[in-house]
């Protein structure tokens, strides 16, 4: 049951293009206004996700990012602009989103998400969106969302390629898709290899679409499917993903029951006991 | 030479920028060896030093993850489509 009171006349007008659709209606709109979405990263993907969810009237948008706006972000990151260079990204994001829709509560989490704070952070939200820019954070967010029982809409980009899938706890996770991270330096990041600015808009908008579908319980979210976007060929393809029964997190006999040290897992720092955690499973 | 292999953006530097290449049928191990002979460096991207499939690069046969088929022994025949999908972390 929606706890949001009846829509005001202004809200009816603002959201009329959503409300008129039978799949959403005023009940669906109030559901969106009741929901709380946590977005990891206020960058290329997090930007369009936050923007479209704010426009859609999602009640609470939490945004986690410890970074500040850099001039090199402005080729793609729609939440930020020339005037906000040097600002904390979450503050720049908040200012932008508030201009679009004052109904939306923006919670600026200006710190890195870590194994220590992730569970507490996610607890207050209904759904998590991954727009992180590194593998360690991606595995951390995956594990924390699964252990918290929250859906995770996961997108990633590099050069002209994008990937998107939605994880519902119990139906597979990021570790089922990619059991181990690449060793440091083996897969370049966007700073090293580049990324097409408009592609971040495509992928982030698709993530926002998935979030709306999951909140409303409509359509077929990308569960058990991985969408591959090739912007150069302009091809969208889907491959199957599965829950791996041997997955250390969500498999039949899990060994990962709480958050671990993801920098060690990703080989960024050595394990305290000198063993490689990557080789350990 | 009649299996189509889709090459992801990050690996196209090995294939002269080509997004689709052809390789020999047989099984996945044979296909990877053939790919590497045509485009040196591909094998190292797909297999580790022990010759096992890397955990951060997936191979799909007609949309199915070969890890859930027979891995490197998965039979591949003319007309099949193989996709290589590496983990990427950009956001």
Image (spheres, rainbow, N blue to C red):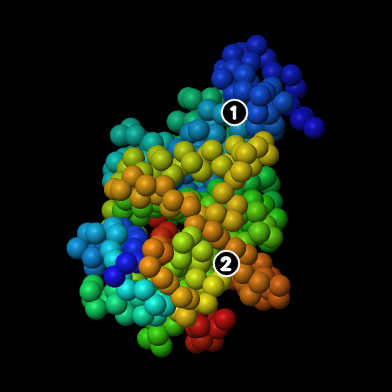
Query: For the residue labelled by badge 2, is the local secondary structure a helix, a strand or a loop?
Result: helix
Numbered badge on residue A168: none
Numbered badge on residue A176: 2
Q: Are marks 2 and 1 in contact (CB under 8 Å)?
A: no
Badge 2 density bin: few <14, some 14–19, many ≥20, Cα 10 Å: many
Instruction: State whether residue A44 appears in this view.
Output: no
Query: For the residue labelled by badge 1, is the local secondary structure a helix, a strand or a loop?
Result: loop
Name the residue that disc number 1 marks.
A57
Residue at the extreme right of the image, as rendered: A1
Question: Foreground residue, A148 or B8?
Answer: B8
Q: Point out residue A241 in the picture as x, y percentages from the top left corner.
A: 55, 60
Q: Point out residue B68 in the picture as x, y percentages from the top left corner.
A: 56, 71
Question: Foreground residue, A85 or B75?
Answer: B75
Tag 1, which chain? A
Tag 2, which chain? A
What residue do we see at 48% from left, 33% from top? A51
- Apparent side of residue B46 relative to residue B35 in the rendered image (left or right): right
Residue at the extreme top of the image, as rendered: A9
Residue at the extreme left of the image, as rendered: B16
What residue do we see at 58% from left, 41% from top? A211
Place residue B12 in its image quadrant: bottom left
Compared to residue A199, the image places residue A22 above or below, namely above
């Amino acid at each position: 049951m929606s706890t949001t009171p009846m829509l005001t006349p202004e809200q009816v007008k603002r959201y009329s293009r959503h409300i008129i659709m039978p799949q959403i209606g005023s009940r669906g709109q109030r559901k969106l206004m009741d929901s709380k979405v946590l977005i990891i990263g206020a960058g290329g993907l997090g930007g369009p996700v936050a923007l479209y969810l704010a426009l859609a009237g999602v009640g609470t948008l939490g945004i986690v990012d410890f970074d500040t706006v850099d001039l090199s972000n402005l080729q793609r990151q729609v939440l930020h602009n020339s005037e906000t260079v040097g600002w904390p990204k979450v503050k720049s994001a908040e200012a932008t989103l508030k201009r679009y829709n004052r109904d939306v509560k923006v919670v600026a989490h200006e710190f890195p998400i870590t194994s220590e704070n992730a569970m507490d952070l996610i607890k207050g939200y209904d759904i998590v969106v991954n727009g992180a820019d590194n593998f360690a954070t991606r595995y951390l967010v995956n594990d924390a969302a699964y252990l918290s029982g929250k859906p995770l809409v996961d997108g990633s980009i590099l050069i002209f390629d994008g990937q998107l899938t939605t994880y519902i706890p119990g139906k597979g996770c990021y570790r089922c898709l990619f059991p181990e991270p690449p060793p440091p330096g083996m897969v370049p990041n966007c700073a090293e290899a580049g990324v097409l600015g408009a592609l971040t808009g495509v992928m982030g908008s698709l993530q926002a679409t998935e979030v709306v579908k999951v909140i409303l319980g409509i359509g077929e979210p990308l569960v058990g499917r991985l969408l591959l976007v090739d912007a150069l060929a302009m091809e969208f393809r889907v491959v199957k993903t599965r829950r791996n029964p041997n997955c250390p997190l969500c498999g039949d006999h899990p060994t990962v029951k709480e958050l671990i040290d993801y920098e060690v897992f990703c080989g960024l720092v050595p394990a305290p006991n000198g063993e490689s955690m990557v080789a350990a499973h | 030479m009649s299996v189509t292999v889709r090459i992801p953006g990050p690996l196209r530097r090995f294939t002269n920028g080509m997004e689709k290449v052809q390789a020999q049928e047989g099984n996945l191990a044979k296909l990877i060896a053939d790919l590497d002979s045509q485009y040196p460096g591909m094998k190292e991207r797909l297999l580790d030093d022990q010759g096992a499939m890397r955990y951060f690069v997936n191979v799909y046969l007609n949309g199915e993850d070969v890890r859930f088929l027979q891995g490197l022994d998965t039979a591949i025949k003319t007309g099949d489509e193989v996709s290589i999908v590496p983990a990427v972390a950009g956001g």
